Image: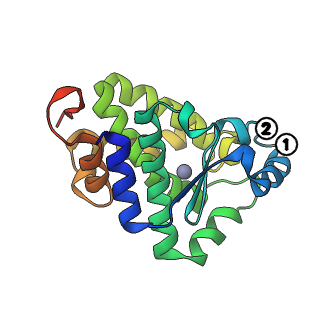
């Protein structure tokens, strides 16, 4: 079992009907892509989207490097857990955000999911990779990718930097769902899949 197999096993234990669909094969995703075109023209080719038990990916599954797909699915898993726990509040607060916005609940949900990406970035490349990914997220949170969900790059940095500190100190990976995700990413210890902590 590699990382992707373990991540799929973890997710399917909570989301047994998990489906992974190429966006190009989904009529619904095609309609959403048209609606979002003015804001996110690369919705279909760059972004993964999750709705309930289905994860829509921008490329065919076999074209993803397996570790990369494991990471993408782990991010979406956090959203799926939040959807299951919070139901209508999740969807409503994620989708219905006034534009342009200052600070949105959407950013708070995404911060939870991107905790996974920061954790795995740190595992893969230590502080330099964590910093690189943080910079990418600052631009992502304050830019058009998610409809300016957190206004201003400096404000986005202040919002996200404490999460990096939790990653560095090991606090984030002590709590769920990050602990389970990190275990799926790391095990078995040994070989080239040994995690840094
Ligand atoms: Zn997300």
At 80% from the left and 50% from the top, the residue drawn is: 30
Residue ranking furthest to the left: 190
At 23% from the left and 26% from the top, the residue drawn is: 192
Residue 70, given in percent of the width and then of the height, sits at: 42, 42
Residue 46, given in percent of the width and then of the height, sits at: 65, 36
Label 2: which residue? 41
Q: How is the image coloured?
A: rainbow
**In what quadrant of the picture does the N terminus appear?**
top left
Residue 77 location, quadrant? bottom left
| Structural distance between the alpha carbons of marks 1 and 2 | 6 Å
Q: Is residue 182 left or right of residue 100?
A: left
Residue 164, compared with residue 131, is above or below; it is below
- Asked if the residue under mark 2 is in contact with the one under mark 1, i.e. CB atoms within 8 Å, the reply is yes
Label 1: which residue? 38
Numbered disc in front, either 1 or 2: 2
How would you rate the neighbour count of disc 2 (Cα within 10 Å): few for under 14, some for 14-19, many for 20 or more? some
At 70% from the left and 62% from the top, the residue drawn is: 97
Residue 8, given in percent of the width and then of the height, sits at: 39, 52
């Amino acid at each position: 079992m590699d990382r992707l197999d373990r991540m799929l096993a973890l997710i399917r234990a909570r989301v047994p009907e998990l489906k992974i669909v190429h966006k190009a094969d989904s009529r619904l995703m095609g309609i959403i892509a048209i609606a979002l075109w003015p804001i996110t023209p690369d919705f279909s080719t760059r972004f993964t989207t999750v709705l309930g038990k289905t994860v829509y990916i921008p490329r065919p599954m076999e074209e993803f490097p397996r570790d990369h797909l494991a990471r993408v699915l782990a991010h979406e898993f956090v959203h799926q857990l939040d959807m299951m726990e919070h139901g209508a509040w999740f969807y409503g607060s994620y989708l219905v955000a006034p534009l342009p916005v200052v600070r949105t609940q959407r950013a708070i949900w995404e911060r939870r999911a991107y905790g996974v990406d920061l954790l795995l970035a740190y595992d893969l490349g230590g502080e330099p990779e964590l910093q690189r990914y943080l910079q990418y997220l600052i631009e992502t949170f304050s830019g058009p990718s998610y409809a300016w969900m957190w206004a201003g790059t400096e404000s986005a940095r202040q919002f996200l930097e404490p999460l990096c500190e939790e990653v560095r100190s090991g606090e984030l990976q002590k709590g769920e769902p990050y602990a389970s995700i990190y275990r799926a990413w790391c095990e078995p210890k040994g070989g080239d899949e040994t995690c840094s902590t």
